[in-house]
Image (cartoon, rainbow, N blue to C red):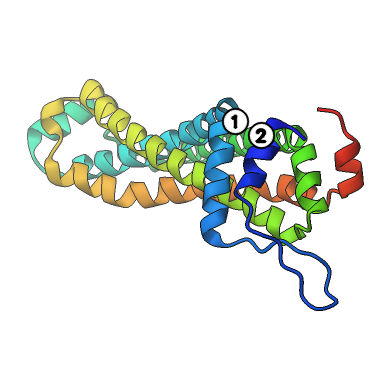
Amino acid sequence: MTKQASTRLASVPTARRGAGAPRTIVLTWRRTFKMCWASVRNRIGRSALTFLGIAVVAAFFMSSFSYQTILSGLMRRQDVHTQAVLEQAGVFTHDAESVKRQRDQRIWLLALSAIVCLTGITNTILMSVTERVREIGTLKCLGALDRFIVRLFLVENLFLGTLGSLTGALVGYLLSLLQIGMSFEFGLLTVGGALQALALGLPIAAGAGTGLTVLAAVYPTYVAAKMKPVDAMRVEV
């Protein structure tokens, strides 16, 4: 048994056996969170890769959304100075075709980043499953059901997805403020406009990053749950 598997098994609750029923492991939510946290710490390198991948995409989402939200607010202003700055930067335009083209470009960039994130996170989680085949086999031999394994992997990746999405969203928000200030003027930024962009963009960026993480974890989690105990224990890692 590997050292990491031993660490995880130390926190597994005592198996229960009913009258004439096969032996199974009862996993409470408290135990689930403890085991997931232990797994993240034991595999800090792999967890960091997943965290960074999610944070980058969430930052890109948040940066694009916040930039457009603040810019739209600036374009609605009627003061001459703001309109002159926007026209000088080539942003203020009444050309519907140009506006449509810019919107389509943003959509394609967001879709492409989502696909790259989904592929990268899925690959990282699959590699994590490969590294833990002996551990999964040990748990199954002790009576762990498929839903036991599914819960462990989903909660672990949900934790990383939420943390990475929130961190990336905050970084993307700061980058959008910096982009507005450097592209136009920092004096054009208002507290109300900045807070509005944060309030509207944070739930979207965090939700998108977390959702992509859960979606990416579906297939690797299925692979782990359906793994046969004998085959898993036979693999050398």
Residue at image position (58%, 47%) is: 35
Where is residue 213 drawn, in percent x and y? 57, 45
Residue at the far bottom in the pictured view: 19
Query: Is residue 201 visible in this depiction of the protein?
Result: yes
Q: In the rendered view, tell whether residue 108 sits above or below residue 236.
A: below
The residue tagged 1 is 43
Seen from the viewer's position, the closer of residues 139 and 218 is 139
Disc 1 or disc 2, which is closer to the eye? 2
Q: Considering only order in the chain, which callout, 2 or 1, is on the residue closer to the N terminus?
A: 2
Where is residue 186 drawn, in percent x and y? 15, 27
Crowding at dot 2, Cα within 10 Å, few <14 / some 14-19 / many 20+, comes out as some
Identified by mark 1, the residue type is: Arg
Element under disc 2: helix
Residue at image position (88%, 33%) is: 235
Drawn side of residue 143 relative to residue 43, left or right = right
Element under disc 1: loop
The residue tagged 2 is 4
Labels 1 and 2 touching (C-beta < 8 A): yes
